[in-house]
Image: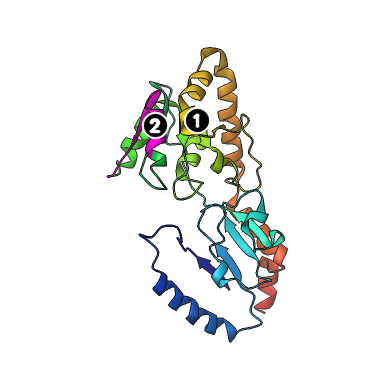
Amino acid sequence: MILMVWLDWANPEKFDTPKVMQVLERYSAYRATFPGTLQIALNHIDYTTKPYALPYWRRGDPILCRTPPYDHSLLAPFPPIDIFPYEFVWGSPSFECDDIAHHAGFIGSRSGFGGYRERVASETSKVGIGYCVTDRLSYGEYAAMMSKCRIIVCPQGWGGGSLRHWDAWKSNKPVLTDRNCSLLEMIPGETLQERVHYLVYDDPSEIPDIVSDWTKLSRRADLEAIAARGRAAALSYDACAQMNTFFDNLGIGAGSLEKSQT
């Protein structure tokens, strides 16, 4: 049994505590009637270090965790040994373009806390395109604008990983992301490194200087190498192989399932 949990505890607009608690009570009673059934807790949402599946987890349950921190101990009380990272199969090379008009670009919604993304947009606008939108652009319009940017700025929102990271990587674009994102295993099985697979800033105020430095003609080859390594890492992720490894480790791979059905 795989239980998918998507609890946005930090977002009061999308979290209905009374409703969730009612579901939790009913589920606890239901599960108690199947003590021998293996449950896989699917911690589906990528909100960094909060173990969102915790209310539905019982010690001994294997945990599929989307975009966990590299340091699995931050997901306590989940035992690090029981946590297995996975990610969506997403992103496309939609930012590919040789007609570069801007050093950097970020267009996004105002998700997250305390005007953080507004600050990112403001600082990015000093060296390229940067603004937050209330009404989303069409994806085609958005991709066309981002394709003209040399560096794609990828800040956190409510969570760390984003479609923007994957679109940039697959488009062979250098990624400038924030420190919180860099602490997450956004590409399962890969340990991404600063200045190897992406660039990292600690505060939005650093964005203009980082972009100005790395877009100098003398650093063009280094920047292109970072983009190439990021792309190779993203393309190396095989979601099906990752899931096969997970189930094989549990001893319930395809072969085991066939035997159980005979």
Task: Give the residue type that dot 1 points to.
Answer: Lys
Res 107 seen here? no
Task: Give the residue type that dot 2 points to.
Answer: Met
Question: Of all residues shown, which one is farthest toward the left?
Answer: 135
Which residue is labeled 2 in the image?
A: 146
Identified at 51% across, 33% down, the residue is 175
* Image position, residue 173 (x, y; %): 50, 30
| Mark 2, secondary structure of its residue | helix
| Residue density around tag 1, few if under 14, some if 14–19, many if 20 or more, within 10 Å | many
Question: Of all residues shown, which one is farthest toward the top?
Answer: 218
Question: Of all residues shown, which one is farthest toward the bottom?
Answer: 33
The quadrant of the image that shows the C terminus is bottom right
Say how many tags the image has: 2
In the image, residue 232 sits, relative to residue 8, either above or below, namely above
Mark number for residue 70? none
Nearer to us in this view, 33 or 227: 33
In the image, residue 48 sits, relative to residue 174, either above or below, namely below
| Mark 1, secondary structure of its residue | loop
Residue 119 image-quadrant placement = top left
Nearer to us in this view, 147 or 25: 25
* Residue 134 located left or right of residue 234: left
Q: Which residues are magenta?
A: 118-135
The quadrant of the image that shows the N terminus is bottom right
Q: Mark 2 and 1 residues: CB-CB less than 8 Å, in contact? A: yes
Nearer to us in this view, 154 or 116: 116
Q: Is residue 237 magenta?
A: no
Q: Is residue 132 magenta?
A: yes
In the image, residue 183 sits, relative to residue 15, either above or below, namely above
Give whichever of discs 2 and 1 has the lower sequence position: 2
Which residue is labeled 1 in the image?
A: 173
* Image position, residue 77 (x, y; %): 64, 64
* Image position, residue 83 (x, y; %): 66, 59
